[in-house]
Amino acid sequence: MAACRGLLLPLGFLGSMFLIMLYFYQWDMSQEKRAERMRQLQELRKQLLKEICASNKEAFSGGKHSLEDISAKNLKNLIVDDTHGIIYCYIPKVACTNWKRVMFVLNQNEPYHDPMSISADMVHSANKLTLLNSFPRTEMKARLRHYTKFLFVRDPFVRLISAYRDKFQRYNKYFYVKFARDILRLYGNQSEPPQTVDEAFASGVHLSFYNFIQYLLDPRTEKKEPFEPHWRQMHRLCHPCLIQYDFVGHQETLQEDAEQLLAILKLQDDIKFPPSYANMTSPASVLDWFRTVPLEDRRKLYQIYEGDFRLFGYRKPGELLDG
């Protein structure tokens, strides 16, 4: 545009207007090409999901054959917006706080507030959002049939690293008492771990990333209770082989996908998705995180999360798994 302005005087009014129109035409064309590329990518994601589910639905649906087989408890990650006819399945560690903010704002009166004006505590607290499992089964099925359903996913190993960093490297009372003490005792050579997170931080006691992986690989972990949602497999939270999603977003293309989704919902002029921060857990850093994890354990971990890799189109990390 600066080049256009430099030519305005010598070209005269008509020539200047032509250059300005040409610039905006080219800009519109590039926007159109970008939108078409995103549409094609979205169709590829949904087609892959359909094909992988068809090839092994039994394995990826946990033995369930239809929505009727899923308990209401296992539908607790689906948030409903009746006003706009939207269902969002949230997955912890995949921009879910910001999407919950959007869903919360959409349930308020117009004009909509800036989603970032809504605190994280508010959207994570009980009864602030309407869950699908709060409706009778017949109404759940009707909404799933007619509403626009979406979810966002993330590279499974990057998501695990993010969960470890957030819940165990940082100060977190609940996750220390609920999980870290047992993990330290079982895998961290701590026969008597500190009672509280304050004592642990003061004494420099922290569970390692490998301790966390050992905990995930231990068969006793899931026998005791299902994986905590921050590291539970994404397909087990959102059931993509039993629920036909209309939009599959990726954390790796979050801003573009968010814009595309809001345009599909015809909300692009009413609400803006919060800007994302620089990702502290980039795919390029995954190898560094896994250096302390033995090769055999990496392979076992991949087997646990293989469904997520395949269903959502993430590359099998050969650099981690090949000897």
Image (cartoon, rainbow, N blue to C red):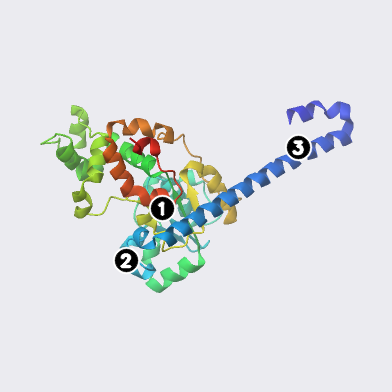
Name the element at disc 2: loop
The earlier-in-sequence mark between 1 and 2 is 2
Residue 57 in the image: above or below residue 36: below
- Label 1 close to label 3 by CB (< 8 Å): no
> Amino acid type of disc 1?
Tyr
Q: Tell me, for residue 90, which label it has, or none.
A: 1
Name the element at disc 1: loop
Residue at mark 2: 71
User: What percent of the width, then of the height, locates residue 275?
Assistant: 51, 40
The earlier-in-sequence mark between 1 and 3 is 3
Residue 174 in the image: above or below residue 106: above
Residue 172 seen in this snapshot: no
> Amino acid type of disc 2?
Ser
Q: CA distance from mark 1 to mark 2?
A: 17 Å
User: What percent of the width, then of the height, locates residue 155?
Assistant: 41, 43
Q: Tell me the residue at 25%/33% (across/down).
A: 208
Residue at mark 3: 23
The quadrant of the image that shows the C terminus is top left
Q: Quadrant of residue 61?
A: bottom left
Q: Is residue 61 left or right of residue 206?
A: right
Q: Tell me the residue at 40%/48% (across/down).
A: 309
Residue 260 in the image: above or below residue 319: below
Residue 33 seen in this snapshot: yes
